[in-house]
Every structure is written in structure tokens, then in C-alpha cells.
Amino acid sequence: MSANVLQFPGYSNPTLDTSSGAPPSNSSHKLRVITATDVEEKVSERIAIDELYPADSEAVAPELKVSLRLLAVGLERVEEAIEADYAGDQIAADDAMQRLQALLPELFCCRNLSDSFGAIIIATYHALKNTEGQPLTQLQIRAIGKALGKARSEPFMRFESSVDEIMALEQAGFVVEPETFEYLADCLDE
Amino acid sequence: MPNSKSFDRPLELSSFEFESIIFEARYSHAYLHWDRAGAIWTEANSKWPNLKMASVDPTKTAFTLPEGYLLTITLENMVCAAYHQDKDLDGYIDVLKDFVELTTRYLEISDFSRIGLRLTYFKEYPDQEAASKALLSTNLLRLPEGKQFGIDGNATHPEYAIRWESKNRGATVRIKAEGRKLDFEAPLNIKELKSVSILKNGLTVDVDYYTLATVSVGQFRAEDWVNNSQHLIKRGIGSFLEAGK
């Protein structure tokens, strides 16, 4: 029988010094004192937008407060639509999405928040308008929810990020441009 | 400068002189700083033609604006500091907005690990004893009575510091009675310059309001965040200064 002896040079098996009751010493330990004025870096989740800009703060711009409030309501309606669709109640799902659609003009009034915010809202507006009353699929409802969720959680995102969300709406089968857009594009081509 | 009668009243932030506002945003190591520092400050210079280089090395670039701004970018953070600008918060926010946009764009930063706003105020007192008494009048500190360490003396230079935190946000409050000494020996051969020796005693109030949770760049708008943070700081510090009432 043979044995392999493994040694770990950096490891020491500390023993308690019973004469002083002092804790075991290990020269590889680093002692760092944390005080009130010393802030530790913490790995953390992303902060909620409502904590950055509280709804009851008079110091937050009104259009930001309004947009966050309306989008919260809109996302609740998306959730209603998803639940109704799962339950097989297409009428309730459609009703919820129509009530969401009613919020979009007021949200468009908040487009000064950022170009990306405005782009997502107007794309969502046209996406729903261009369905011409046809009920949405589960995929489409979720795509709308994702786009509006992004607009709510990151209203000041870079424009490229909003383009990604708009493309996701198109991939879900929506037409995100106004119906006259193709004629305008033709005119510009000529 | 506050008159002598104001020294006896309970402390209020309105009796303090605003000194500085400092915004800091931290991020994961932005190594692109090594490649793009020149491009950042070239564009900054076109936006602010009076930009002046303060210090430059591979890990940190710092520039100043004559209005009293110091803009700093390092591998780990960006800082926008302004001194004695309380009457022009809008101007500070305009500079900050552009500075953050420029820096996050060139360094391709998508998230901040921490953002913080630090405000400092100072109130002058005739001497150290008066400043110390003012801090002790807040009842934020409890002192033992009688002789201490065999010394029959008084408490001087008291200092109070505390961190107030939730899971996602925090604030650090420091209130300190301090003396500030400025000694400047002017060169003898320059008649326009005079030597200066100034001693000021007073109370410093320093509040840092910050996030602990990550903040996406897409969540951040300077105007709203700075205004709200300043509002929270001014409102919150009252609880500390007026605790002795």
C-alpha cells in the first residue's frame, strides 16, 4: 500500500492559544476595519426604478412620475391579458389589451423623457392599432409586455436598446409603423 | 456669514454655507479608458472650450472648468464635483448630464455598481469651543461627566458619523467640529501676491446619499436623481441637526 502526501503550503492548521484565549492566528488573513465612513462594494440586483424616483417626491419631474404610473397600470393589464389567455378567455384578454391601448396616447405625451422611450411607446401604439381588432396571440401579448416593461425599468436607455425592443415586436408579428409609412417610403425612394 | 446671534439657536441647515456637491458613479473596470481617454476629452473640449487639464495618468484623467467644476474619470469611477455652486444647481446638472452621457458612451458602460451624491456644508464659529458646543447641543453624542483619563478638561473637536442603510440605498452622515488652517507664504519677488494665514473654526456637515444596488445607465437621469437626492439630503439632515430640540 502506498500513500500520496499532498501538501498545501498556504494552509496552516490553527490552534487556539489557550493561555491568552486569543483567536487563532493565520498570517494569510487580512483584517479590514469597516467604519461608518467606509462603504463596502456589494454585488447586488438592480435597483427598482420606483426607488430611484419615488412617486411622492416633488423633486422628480412630473412626466417621469406620470409615465411610471401609467406603465405600471399598463403592465397590470398585460398580466390580466396573459392570465385570461391561459384560461381560454379570449374576450377578457382582448378587453385587457384594449384598456392598455387606451393608455398609450397619454404615455406618448411623456416622450420628452427620451427618444428611446418615445420610440417604444409609438411602436407599441402602431403595433396594436395595426392589428385592426384581431385578438393577439400569447406571444404577442408577452412581446408588448416586454417592450413596455423595458420602457418602465429603463426609460433613459440608449436608442439602440429601444430598437432591439421594437425589432422584437416585429418578430412577434406586429407592424410597428403607421399604415401610411410604406407610401412615404415609396415617395422617398422616388 | 452668519451673525453671532445665530450661534445660540438650534442648528438648521439653512444657517450653513454650501461648500460642495459631488456626484460619483462606480462601475466595473472600464479598461477602454486606456484606449479612449483622448477621444472622451476631445469631445468634452468641443462641448466646454474652457476645459483645462488637471492631471492625467493611465488610470485617471481629470479636467477642470473655470466655473468651479472638477471632472474625473478613472478605471472604476467617474466624479463630477462642484464647489460653492449652490445657486446654480441647474448648471451643475447640465454639466453632469453631458459628462455622464459622454463617459458611458465611450467607455461602453451599461451599469453602475453605485451612484452617490455628496453634499457638504460649513458653518463658521468664533472658536473651537463654540463649534464643539454647537455639535454637542444636537444631543447626537453622549458624553461621560467629570474627569476622564485623569484630565479635568472639556470635549473638543467632537465628531459624529453614521451610516443609515436599507437593502438598496444608504446615506452616510458626518458632522464634525473642526478647525481649518490656511497658510500661504507668498514669494517675496511677486508684489501682487500677499501671504495669507487664516484659521477658521466651525461645523462641517457632510452627507453622502448613495445606492447599494446596481443602477442601469438606462435608469439614470441626472436631473431627476440629483434633484431628488438633494431634496432627501436636505430634508433628512434636519433630523440629525435638530435632535437636540
Image (tube, helix red, strand yellow):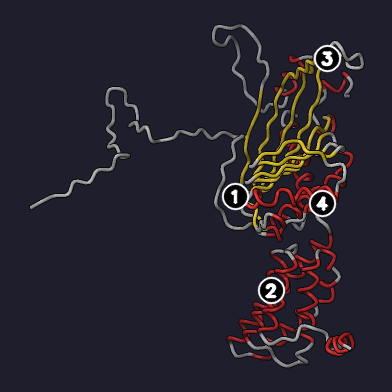
Q: Amino acid at mark 3?
A: Ala
Counting residues from the N terminus, which is met first, the one under dot 4 or under dot 2? 4
Q: Amino acid at mark 1?
A: His
Give how far across and how far down residue A156 sits, in percent. 75, 62
Mark 1 falls on what kind of element? loop
State the count of labels.
4
Give how far across and how far down residue A34 sits, in percent. 53, 35
Mark 3: few, some, or many residues within 10 Å (few <14, many ≥20)? Answer: few
Q: Amino acid at mark 4?
A: Ala
Foreground of the two, B238 or A59: A59
Q: CA distance from mark 2 to mark 3?
A: 61 Å
Q: Is residue A153 left or right of residue A22?
A: right
Mark 3 falls on what kind of element? loop
Q: Amino acid at mark 2?
A: Asp
| Same chain letter for marks 2 and 1 | no
Give how far across and how far down residue A108 sits, in percent. 83, 73
Residue at x 57% of width, y 45% of height: A41
Q: Closer to the observer: label 2 or label 3?
A: 3
| Tags 2 and 3 touching, CB below 8 Å | no
Mark 4 falls on what kind of element? loop
| Same chain letter for marks 4 and 3 | no
Q: Which residue is mark 2?
A: A164
Q: Which residue is mark 1?
A: B29
Foreground of the two, A13 or B57: B57
Mark 4: few, some, or many residues within 10 Å (few <14, many ≥20)? Answer: some
Give how far across and how far down residue B238 sits, in percent. 76, 36
Mark 2 falls on what kind of element? helix
Q: Closer to the observer: label 2 or label 1?
A: 1
Q: Is residue B181 above or below residue B28?
A: above
